[in-house]
Amino acid sequence: MNLSFNIAIESSKQIALFVAPVLVLLSLVAGPAPMTLEFSHLEVTALALSVGAVTLAALNGESNWLEGAMLLALYGMLAVAFYHTTP
């Protein structure tokens, strides 16, 4: 179980640290307006909550259905929060 947690966490970190700067650079060429690395309060809160939830789930090196349900519930709450915000 430890290997699967490490693979999931490390790959998500690498993708997050690679994709955001690449999108900013691509927006200079392809977008109508340049994109910035400025995040809203909701995005920062969502990131902090998701990092905290994954840390709690991976803390003991084991997983059960309740931790998975907790992560799915957080995902659902964040999806609803982002759906109801105005751009």
Image: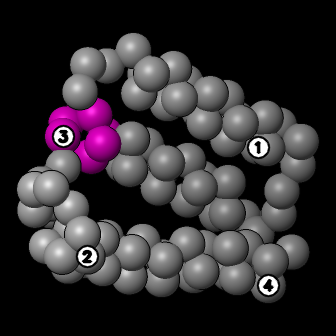
Marks 1/2 in contact by CB < 8 Å: the verdict is no
Along the line of sight, the residue nearer the viewer: 79 or 10: 79
Pointer 4 residue: 3
Expressed as whole percent of the image width and height from the top left, the position of residue 31 reads 21, 61
Residue at 57% of width from left, 82% of height from top?
10
Residue 26: which numbered mark, if any? 2
* Separation (CA) of disc 3 from disc 1: 28 Å
Q: What's the amino acid at mark 3?
A: Ser
First along the sequence among labels 2 and 3: 2
Along the line of sight, the residue nearer the viewer: 1 or 44: 44
Asked which quadrant contains residue 87, the reply is top left
* Separation (CA) of disc 1 from disc 2: 37 Å
Q: Is residue 17 visible?
A: no
Q: Which secondary structure, mark 4?
A: helix
Pointer 1 residue: 67
Residue at 55% of width from left, 72% of height from top?
12
Expressed as whole percent of the image width and height from the top left, the position of residue 47 reads 38, 50
Q: Is residue 8 above or below residue 36?
A: below
* Separation (CA) of disc 1 from disc 4: 17 Å
Q: What's the amino acid at mark 1?
A: Glu
Quadrant occupied by the N terminus: bottom right
Near mark 3 (Cα within 10 A), the count class, few <14, some 14-19 or many ≥20, is few
Pointer 3 residue: 40
Marks 3/1 in contact by CB < 8 Å: the verdict is no
Number of the front mark, 2 or 3: 2
Looking at the rendering, the stretch of residues picked out in magenta corresponds to 40-45
First along the sequence among labels 2 and 4: 4
